[in-house]
Image (cartoon, coloured by chain):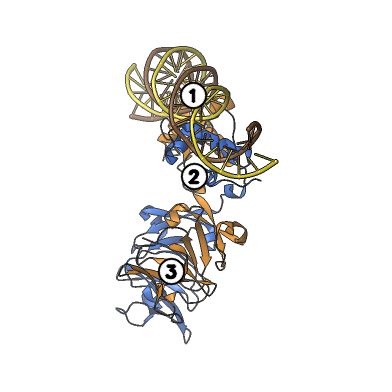
Chain colours: A orange, B blue, C yellow, D brown
Amino acid sequence: MPALTDQQQAIRDFIETEVAAGRPCPSQREIAEHFGFASKTAAACHVRALVKKGVLAVEPGKARSLRFMDGTRLLRQGVVEIPLFGSIPAGFGRDREQEADECVPVTIESIGFKPTRNTFALRVVGDSMIGKHICDGDVVILEHGPEPRSGQIVAALIDRKSTLKTFLLKNGKPFLKAENSKYPELIPSEELVIQGVFRALIRKEE
Amino acid sequence: MPALTDQQQAIRDFIETEVAAGRPCPSQREIAEHFGFASKTAAACHVRALVKKGVLAVEPGKARSLRFMDGTRLLRQGVVEIPLFGSIPAGFGRDREQEADECVPVTIESIGFKPTRNTFALRVVGDSMIGKHICDGDVVILEHGPEPRSGQIVAALIDRKSTLKTFLLKNGKPFLKAENSKYPELIPSEELVIQGVFRALIRKEE
DNA sequence: TGGCATACTGTCCAAATGGACAGTATATCA
DNA sequence: TGATATACTGTCCATTTGGACAGTATGCCA
């Protein structure tokens, strides 16, 4: 990657500062105005050079669509906070916002999907899900709402405690296969509240 | 602050997701298109309602200038890019930068420690580490360099393939306990190259 | 000497964009 | 019953914006 000239660096820094300050990405004319250019083409030319050098990316025709390609800067984007529960409360519903004691910030790319309002995280307590290779202390990320497919892992509410189970369709009827020996192998899913479908897992050592 | 309607919440979430994913703030027409509105005024109307309710701020006349008043959502920090290898190359050393085909962006908080230059990620292939509840397709994050403590999981190079093993101190001598039945239970660690110490794991469903 | 990148000014234009207005329809609330 | 908020369709328009083109000038390198 070729080195940037002083002017290109200055323009790069200006864009970064604006974005970091929470303001919208500057337009070509705003850049020109900030640097005192009489022509916005000067700004456009520098931006083009930055794109050519792999510093910026742009979506052609879209206003204010500059993005940084630079590793760390680019990755500042794409972080989403997912509410984390120690255990899913019994009255799980719309008002769970208040019950989230903390949040897990994750990058969209690392978990492989875009979290929605229905996405939540659960801290695993105990080894009851060890059959699914999910250990004590793991953080699982689940999505509330979608109908699980057969074979998927779901979080279900049993005895006011949420446990991970495998969702199965047997003869067209939905069952939950327990991963914990304390419970029967197959449970008709109608008796249980399915909290969410397993999407991702994060394990920290120590 | 008045409560948001479902539709307003959906539009708020859409804007948040787009911005969080690093894409430019959607225009009114892009919002309308995403929700299938025939008229962009519908989107504009909802945005106006969100501004009125204090959720969003807008700079009049500026394209893609929506901002969240919320604050917490805009906190993007602590993202680090970790080089990801399909398999650790034999000549693992300083020059591994070039060999990283891709990177995993993670937040420091989600993996529980601050990655250094010696931190790397490894995509698990096969079930050879299932004994450690690490599955095919998982991404493990390791740190190169530090002397492992007894009982910690390490990545070791065997037959030009890296495998996870448990590091043990037996009578003061270091051994690696295999988690793969194809290898002897205990291997003197001097014979092997320890690539790194297990730090964290990320699993994606599907 | 020519070619090339940088660093601008100045102009024109089509597309993108936000804003305003005119309607329609359905709720809720007083 | 009327006022208000929601939830749209549809249209017109001024402004914003990016893109392309024509020039000028400087410095660097081969």
Q: Is residue B138 left or right of residue B62?
A: left
Pointer 3 chain: A
Looking at the rendered structure, the secondary structure element under dot 1 is helix
Among the two numbered marks 3 and 1 on one chain, the one whose residue lies closer to the N terminus:
1
Disc 3 or disc 1, which is closer to the eye? 3
Q: Do pointers 2 and 1 mark residues of a single chain?
A: no
| Residue under numbered circle 3 | A190
Q: Is residue B86 left or right of residue A190?
A: left
The quadrant of the image that shows the N terminus of chain A is: top left
| Residue under numbered circle 1 | A42
Q: Position of residue A91 (x, y in %)?
A: 57, 65
Q: Please give the name of the residue rendered at 44% of the width and 56% of the height, measured from the top-left corner.
A: A110
| Crowd tier of the residue under label 2, counting other residues whose Cα lies within 10 Å: few below 14, some 14–19, many 20 or above | some
Q: Amino acid at mark 2?
A: Phe
Disc 2 or disc 3, which is closer to the eye? 3
Viewer-side residue, C30 vs B52 = C30
